[in-house]
Amino acid sequence: MRIDARKNAQQRVDRIAAFRSELAALEREGALSLTPAQRSRLDAHLDRLLSGFQRQFGADVTDGARRMSWGMRVTSLLGGAALMAGLVLFLQRIWGELPLTAQVAILTAAPLALLAGVEAAHRRQADRYYVALLALGAGAAFVMELGALGSVLNLADSMQVLLAWGLFALLVAYAHGLRLLLGAGLVLLCAYSAALLLTWQGYYWAEFAHRAQALLPGALALYCIPWLPRGPGSDDFRFVYHACGAGTGLTALLVLSTSGDLCCGGLRPGTVEAAYQLVGLLLSAGVVFHGLRLNRKGLVDLGVLGFIVFLFVRLYAWWWHWMPKYIFFLVLGLIAIGLALVCRRLRSRLAGGAAL
Amino acid sequence: MRRLLVVAAMGVVLAANGWSVLQAWRNRSDRRGGTMELTERELRVETPAVESTAKILRLNWNVARLGDKERGPAAWLDAAKLAELGFDCGLPLSDPSARRHYTSMPSRPVFLALEYEGDAWRKAGATEPAKSHLWVVDAARDPHRLREQYPDPQHYIICRGLVRLGFRDRELGGGPPPLAPRLQGWIADVCPDELFVPLPHSRVLRALRQTGSEGPETSKAGGPRFAVRVCWGANYEPWVEGVRRLGSPNDK
């Protein structure tokens, strides 16, 4: 895929910059010295590579170019948001003057036009960031458009919008290799599965936060999809599936651990809450170890965050009401230091393993 | 492959929009939910958050309540009625986990019967001019049963709504627990409770002075300034069929 080629080109450019810097350091320390002929051959080769990457993929080959690229991206983001806001406000201004058919036509055309823009940007080999920005705009337009259409036609809320939004995000994400849109699509589809479960039980679909356990099957499915024989594609996409599954599942468990939902028969609410919190702690630790195994920093961070939150919630339930507050925070601080020591030990063990 | 995915995404947009239009068309093919002329008391003009020419009316309804007249539970939504609406009311109220069990229940979608200028309105004090004359009088899972019970579509609307269950074992404000805990029900919402007014009907509303959200009593004489003919269709969703200005408070 061209998007991957562009990413690989930028990574190669970054590696070349790091190599040149390290080579200079080694030469200064006297550990390595190249003959003038070797030096000029190497420089010519690297310069040829860099100019090729810059010409073919628009890669940033200098620090200045990289900084300018970031500036352009921020400016584009703000400009795009301002344009969208201007367009939405203009439509609101004339909305009451338009007949119903024109309103439906405009609402339908808006996400399609942005989608066409994404396609045009892709064909013109624009920077991936701009393709992603336009795709996000198309997703946002589709979300607003369906809401506005429901309002114009006086339709009751329907959970099918979650399915439509989720499918749209997933299709555009796979078409253009966009992780953020993939994550949004997966979370929307997970919410749709929870809404479906709630509807089967006769409840209002939008209140799945009251029945957070309805999110758990979808979250588990998301986490497990990368293990299917024909998985979700690239490594980046596998990570998004794991992260969305873990994030949604741990959030659902956190809600359950504070509201003590009674899915477990005659158990006392306090027991149920404690059970959810302990399960949350164990699963967070599991996510950390899985992230370490996959060498995915994002997954490790997510697991650590989940572990800390669940630990705090459990300690709060155990100690907050009877312990003097200063002792509570003292104990909390000591536990945090202990956890940091454990992490340090784990890190040195991992570093030792890598050195071997 | 990429082109196929993009075409599929466009297909999702077209399908979702087509489905919405189809549902609206199906809804408007039959007025089984009822047809009624409501006034500014029942349909308040919404003040847009940003400059907008769209006209939205918010349905303003009442229900006979226990205790607090603004936020109290519906008087007729007792435990038996809630069980009939599908809530699991099997757990004894004295059970230690009863509070958690009942308070963790989400709302249930139901069909509501709304009565216009009927007994509920008269009993509640028909003299209050600012109050809506539209009262929620019944709820059921089956709209046909409600229509059989309230057959007059000129005075009874059947529409969609949400019912929420509440568990009460103490007085409001954290007072001492009463002797017997009880289940209560609230009409959480009428769906949808906002009506978009299309052209040409919106022109009538645009001619009115914008009054903000202080309430429906906006004419100098204290009466409603406009009347809206609203229909509820085959999906029990509403649409505006006509708007007319009311000349004087006695016009309606």
Image (cartoon, coloured by chain):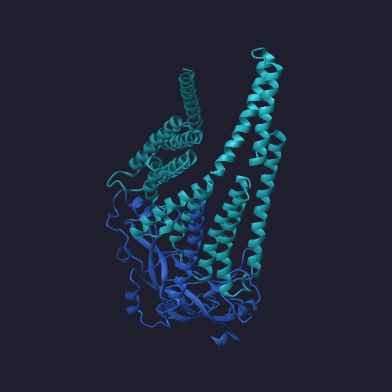
Chain colours: A cyan, B blue
> For this rendering, which residue is in front, A314 or A210?
A210
Is residue A293 positioned above or below A58 on the image?
Answer: above
Task: Name the residue rendered at 62%, 72% in the picture.
Answer: A96
Residue B231 x, y percent position in the rendering: 47, 79
Residue A186: x %, y % from top left = 46, 49
Q: Is residue B96 above or below residue B82?
A: above
Q: Quadrant of residue B227?
A: bottom right
Could you tell whether B183 is left or right of A156 in the image?
left
**Left or right, residue A277 beside residue A333:** left
- Tell me: A165 left or right of B178: right
- Residue A116 horizontal side relative to residue A230, left or right: right
State the residue at coordinates (36%, 79%).
Answer: B150
* Camera sees residue B168: no
Of residues B242 and B118, the one drawn nearer to the viewer in this rendering: B242
Question: Which residue is drawn at the image coordinates 35% and 52% (left, top)?
Answer: B99
Place residue B135 in its image quadrant.
bottom left
Q: Nearer the viewer, residue A242 or A45?
A: A45
Please state the horizontal and vertical placement of residue B6, each as a whole percent of the image. 51, 55
Q: Position of residue B174 (x, y in %)?
A: 43, 52
